Image: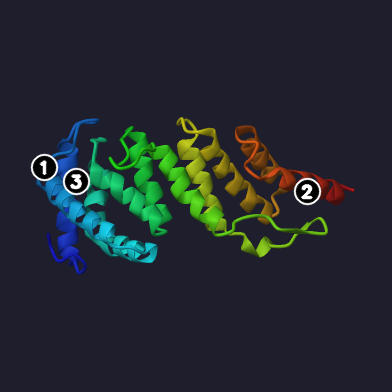
Amino acid sequence: MTSKNNMSPAAKLRQKKLAAKAAAKAPHGKQQTGDAYALHMAALAEARQQLSSAQSMDRKIAIKKEKLTEFLPYVEGAIENGNGAQDQVIANIMVWCLDVGEIDTGIHIAEYMLKHGMDSADQYQRTVPAILVEETIDPALKDGLTVRWSDGKITNASDFNAKRLAQFKMVETLTRDHDMHDQIRAKLFKAIGSYEALAGKLTQAVESFERALKLDSNVGVKKHVERIHALITKQSA
């Protein structure tokens, strides 16, 4: 494979075309084959070996960011022309994109995988919908996404992130008809509701929080619902 980190535009285009050609030939649901796939599977094995040798999460993220440039031309070509053949390169790179914060790219890849009913990467026990939700939502919740209150008012409206809310809603749309554990989907609605509350969309926030509660009574939004109802009543008085 061309130099791992300094791939020329011409090399990227060549990889994309080779992947597109192979993907167009591979039937839906069957295992992807061909030289381009074999080459990238070998590179993936090498990259995963590097990841297993790294100890810190920051180092693992740095390796994934570095390696994405090596794999994305192949993934882009396969997605543009593919029929949904089972592809472990695509499955792994979807997760890597989400891991390093390339959320839009990760969602785009996941959309293709969901459309064609593709399997998740072999090392994951979770389905593609569950991975998409958790790898998108969990980092936000761990980073402190919540609604903070004082004297019955929301005090951290400045934490609102319109792009993140749009991404979370896209994830909800893509996974709506797919089965997953209730606790996982509850976290998705908790995150959506939090951003809706921060945006001042109180009615929508209550709806999202209540959907979260129906799925998981311990999701941690009961107080938000009570306070938002009180705030709506106060604003309507």
Above or below 172: residue 154 = below
User: Closer to the N terminus: mark 2 or mark 3?
Assistant: 3
- Toward the bottom, the furthest residue is 6
Which amino acid type is shown beneath numbered disc 1?
Gly
**Quadrant of the drawing holding the N terminus:** bottom left
Which amino acid type is shown beneath numbered disc 3?
Ala
Q: Is residue 113 visible?
A: yes
SS assignment at label 1: loop
SS assignment at label 3: helix
Q: Which residue is mark 2?
A: 227
Which amino acid type is shown beneath numbered disc 2?
Arg
Q: Residues within 10 Å of mark 2 (few under 14, many from 20)?
A: some
- Residue 11: x and y in percent read 15, 62
Which residue is found at the position 31% from the left and 35% from the top? 118
SS assignment at label 2: helix
| Label at residue 20 | 3
Determine whether, in the image, residue 189 is placed left or right of residue 52.
right
Q: Which residue is mark 1?
A: 34
User: Closer to the N terminus: mark 1 or mark 2?
Assistant: 1
- Toward the right, the furthest residue is 237
Determine whether, in the image, residue 153 is placed left or right of residue 107.
right
- Residue 93: x and y in percent read 30, 51
